[in-house]
Image: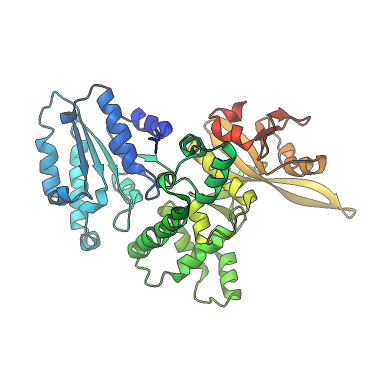
C-alpha cells in the first residue's frame, strides 16, 4: 500500500512547532495518530535538517521502553538526551497512557508525576513536546484538561475521501462505494475484501467497547452496544436521550434510562466514535438545545454495528459530507429556518431544516445533501430552507450524480459529491 501523506494534519502540526505548548494529537484509536507523529512528522523534521540526535522518539507501548513507563525514569531519559542548551530538541511520546497503570490512575499519584514530567519539559525553552494517547486508562481529553491552556490539540480523523481515493486504486465510483461501506480506517486499504468486515467488527468489540467499559466501569456493556446500534440506524435523524430511552422501553429494555443514555453518548463522544451536530436557529441566531443529530467518525464502524445490513446511501452520504466539513476545520450545525406559510387556508409557522451550517472564522456556507435533484419539484424541496435564509452566504446542494457544477436562478450552487470531496476549495467554486 502506498504511504498516505495526510498533508492537512501534517501542516497543522508543523504550524504549531516551537509554540511553547505541548502538542496533543487526539482522535479515535487506529486512525493514524502514531503514523502522523512517528513517520510523517519525524521525516519532516529530518528533511528540515534536524539531526536524529535532536529527535527523541519514545513509543511507550514498545516492550523495549518498559523501563521508561516510570515517570521518574522517563524524565531522566529525556534530560540525558537534551543536555545541550544551545540546541533545540523535539520529544515525540507515543501512547502516553502506557506510563500509567490502572491502579495508578485510580490513586492519581503516578498520574500527577507524569504531568510533572511534561510540565517540566514545558519550562525548558529548548524542548518541543508532542504526545499521543487514548484508551481506557487515559483519554486525550484528560491530557488537555490537565494542561489548561498549555496544551495544543491537533485532532485527527479516519481518512477523508481525498486521502482514501488515490490510495484505493479503483475508479471514483468503486472507491466511493467502498468508502461508504468500509469507511476510512487506514489499515482497511491493505486488507482483502473478505477481511474488512472482520477487522471493523473486531475494532469495535475488542477495542472501542472494551475501552469505554473499562474506562467508566461499565460491567454490562449490552446497554451501550444497543445505544450505538440505535444511533447508527438513525444517522441524520434528530434525537435525544429521552427519545432513545422511550424506544428502548417500547422494546422491553426498561433498564436504560435517559440519564444513562446521556452518559453513554458522552463516553462515545470522548472516544471520538461519534460527533454531535446541534440545531441552530438561523434567523433567531441562537442554538436549540434538543434534539440533535449524531454522526459517526467512520462509516465502516457505523456499518459494522449494523452487520453491514443498512446501506442507505442517503444517510451515509450525509455523514460523509459532515465528516468532510469537520476535516476541513469547520464547526458544523444543523440549520433551522422558521417561515410563515399557509396550509389548508390557515396561517402557520413552519420549521425548515438545512442539513449543515458550516462556519470557519468569517466564512459560512449552507449545505444540503441530496442523492439527486432530478426535477423541479425535488429542487424546490431541497432548496426551500436555504432560499428563506436572510443573508448572502453561499448556498450549496451536494448531489451524488456526476453533473457539472452549476447555479440555478435562485443562486443555489449544485455540485457533485466528487467535486465537493476531492477539491479542497470546492465550497468557493
Residue for point 65% across, 31% down: 393
Task: Tally the marks.
Answer: 0
Quarter location, residue 388? top right
Q: Quadrant of the C terminus?
A: top right
In the shown orientation, is residue 30 left or right of residue 63? right
Residue for point 76% across, 30% down: 408
Q: Quadrant of the N terminus?
A: top left
In the shown orientation, is residue 267 left or right of residue 287? left
Residue for point 39% across, 29% down: 11
Give the x, y percent position of residue 67.
12, 50
Vertical comparison of 425 with 120: above or below: above
Residue 149: tell me if it is visible.
no
Residue 187: tell me if it is visible.
yes
Vertical comparison of 99 with 364: above or below: below
Residue for point 46% across, 66% down: 224
Give the x, y percent position of residue 232.
55, 58
Amino acid at each position: 500500500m502506498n504511504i498516505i501523506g495526510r498533508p492537512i494534519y501534517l501542516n497543522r502540526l508543523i504550524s504549531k512547532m516551537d509554540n511553547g505548548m505541548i502538542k496533543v494529537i487526539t482522535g479515535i484509536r487506529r486512525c493514524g495518530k502514531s503514523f502522523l507523529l512517528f513517520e510523517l512528522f519525524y521525516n519532516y523534521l529530518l528533511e528540515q535538517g534536524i539531526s536524529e540526535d535532536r529527535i527523541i522518539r519514545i513509543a511507550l507501548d514498545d516492550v523495549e521502553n518498559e523501563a521508561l513507563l516510570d515517570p521518574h525514569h522517563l524524565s531522566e531519559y529525556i534530560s540525558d538526551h537534551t543536555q545541550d542548551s544551545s540546541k533545540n530538541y523535539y520529544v515525540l511520546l507515543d501512547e502516553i497512557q502506557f506510563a500509567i497503570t490502572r491502579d495508578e490512575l485510580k490513586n492519581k499519584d503516578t498520574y500527577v508525576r507524569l504531568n510533572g514530567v511534561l510540565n517540566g519539559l514545558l519550562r525548558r525553552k529548548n524542548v518541543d513536546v508532542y504526545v499521543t494517547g487514548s484508551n481506557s486508562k487515559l483519554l486525550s481529553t484528560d491530557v488537555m484538561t490537565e494542561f489548561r491552556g498549555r496544551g495544543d490539540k491537533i485532532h485527527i480523523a479516519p481518512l477523508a475521501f481525498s486521502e482514501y481515493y488515490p490510495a484505493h486504486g479503483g475508479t471514483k465510483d468503486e472507491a466511493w462505494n467502498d468508502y461508504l461501506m468500509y469507511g476510512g480506517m487506514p489499515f482497511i486499504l491493505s486488507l482483502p475484501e473478505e477481511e474488512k468486515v472482520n477487522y471493523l467488527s473486531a475494532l469495535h468489540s475488542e477495542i472501542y467497547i472494551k475501552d469505554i467499559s473499562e474506562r467508566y466501569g461499565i460491567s454490562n456493556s449490552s446497554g451501550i452496544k444497543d445505544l450505538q446500534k440505535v444511533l447508527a440506524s438513525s444517522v441524520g435523524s434528530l434525537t435525544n436521550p429521552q427519545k432513545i430511552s422511550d424506544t428502548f422501553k417500547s422494546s422491553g429494555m426498561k433498564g436504560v434510562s435517559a440519564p444513562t443514555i446521556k452518559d453513554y453518548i458522552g463516553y462515545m463522544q470522548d472516544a471520538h466514535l461519534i460527533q454531535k451536530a446541534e440545531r441552530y436557529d438561523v434567523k433567531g441566531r441562537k442554538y436549540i438545545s434538543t434534539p440533535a443529530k449524531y454522526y459517526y467518525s467512520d462509516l465502516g464502524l457505523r456499518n459494522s454495528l449494523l452487520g453491514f445490513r443498512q446501506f442507505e446511501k442517503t444517510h451515509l452520504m450525509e455523514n460523509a459530507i459532515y465528516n468532510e466539513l469537520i476535516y476541513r476545520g469547520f464547526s458544523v450545525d444543523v440549520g433551522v429556518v422558521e417561515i410563515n406559510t399557509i396550509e389548508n387556508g390557515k396561517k402557520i409557522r413552519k420549521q425548515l431544516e438545512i442539513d449543515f451550517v458550516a462556519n470557519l472564522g468569517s466564512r459560512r456556507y449552507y449545505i444540503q445533501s441530496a442523492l439527486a435533484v432530478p426535477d423541479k419539484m425535488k429542487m424546490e424541496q431541497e432548496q426551500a430552507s436555504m432560499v428563506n435564509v436572510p443573508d448572502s452566504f453561499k448556498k450549496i446542494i451536494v448531489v451524488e450524480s456526476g453533473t457539472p457544477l452549476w447555479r440555478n436562478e435562485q443562486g443555489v450552487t449544485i455540485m457533485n459529491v466528487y467535486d465537493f470531496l476531492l477539491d479542497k476549495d470546492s465550497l468557493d467554486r
